[in-house]
Image: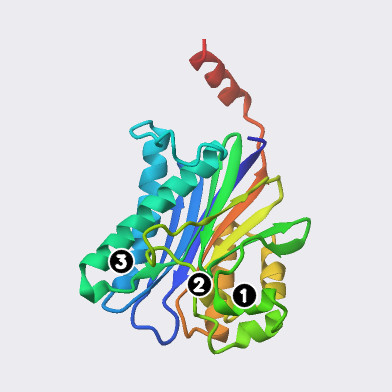
Amino acid sequence: MEFDIELASYTDIGKIREKNEDSVLIAPELCLGAVADGMGGHNAGEVASNLAVSILRQTLSDLKSKKISIPQDFEPKLDPIARKLLYASGLANLRIYTLSSENYRRRGMGTTLSAVYIEPNASAAVHIGDSRIYRLRDGVLKQISKDHSYVQEQVARGLISKEQAEKSRIQNILTKALGLKKDMRCDVIKLNPQPGDVYMLCSDGVNKGIKDSEIEAILKKPLSAGRLCQEIVKFSAHNDGKDNVSCVVFKMLPKKEKSIFKKLTGFLKNN
């Protein structure tokens, strides 16, 4: 890997919500970060989002340590990292769907999921719902995920503008989310991270209080990943705060040269 990675997360309950149904995950040992925004009454949203990130982490960890393996007939034509992400998110979807079906108090339970996973020689993102994944490269911010929502479908058809979609009263109606169907499938996005890139994952609560141009301005600041998360979440919560507000930030930093002592230690360990 030709760069070092700094990873951080931050979440805020917002101004009016009684509980936080967002779940954020950072797993430095896996180079994994995720945001999930749950939905459903009787604490079901909180349960769904927590299941999504915890099952994703555990499955990828078990695959890495070879405690489990992916069935050979599961998406055999895809890249290995895409298969891992789809397999892990599929297990999360099935678990959430099963709980929702078995418990009437959790009917309709579901969650968004946006995650970035980086291996030494491969990287990809998995996404479903209206949480978002952004990439800042060469000073330019780009949303690399696609919102699975009714208003986004209207934007794609040219019926309304993106600005109108952001203010729509029905912007929270999702067309896809984990747990809604037994066979729900996430999008997989191939990544090619480079030194200097910044990736940001966020729940839709962030976008309600901050514009993309304002996100870009903050991510350009020479701050740590943790400080960037805090600035974005606090800025959005201050301006809106009607929803839970959560984000995860990856910073791709130029690889640091090892000291002579560390090089010597590494040499002795390998000989």
**Label at residue 153:** 1
Q: Nearer the viewer, residue 270 or 163?
A: 163
**Quadrant of image for the N terminus:** top right
Answer whether labels 1 and 2 touch (C-beta < 8 Å).
yes
In depth, the one of 149 and 222 nearer the eye is: 149
Q: Residues within 10 Å of mark 3 (few under 14, many from 20)?
A: many
Q: What is the x, y in percent for residue 67? A: 33, 33
The type of residue carrying mark 3 is: Val
Amino acid type shown at disc 1: Glu
User: Is 50 displayed left or right of 214 in the figure?
Assistant: left
Q: CA–CA distance between discs 1 and 2?
A: 9 Å
Between 149 and 218, the one lying in front of the other is: 149
Residue tagged by mark 3?
A: 47
Q: Earlier in the sequence, mark 1 or mark 2?
A: 1
Q: Nearer the viewer, mark 2 or mark 3?
A: 2
- Location of residue 244 (image quadrant): bottom left
Q: Earlier in the sequence, mark 2 or mark 3?
A: 3
Residue at 55% x, 69% y is 148
Q: Is residue 217 left or right of residue 250?
A: right
Amino acid at circle 2:
Thr
> Rounded to the nearest whole Å, what is the CA distance between mark 3 and mark 1?
28 Å
Q: CA distance from mark 2 to mark 3?
A: 20 Å
The percent coordinates of residue 89 (x first, y second) are 43, 52
Give the structural element (helix, strand or loop) at label 2.
loop
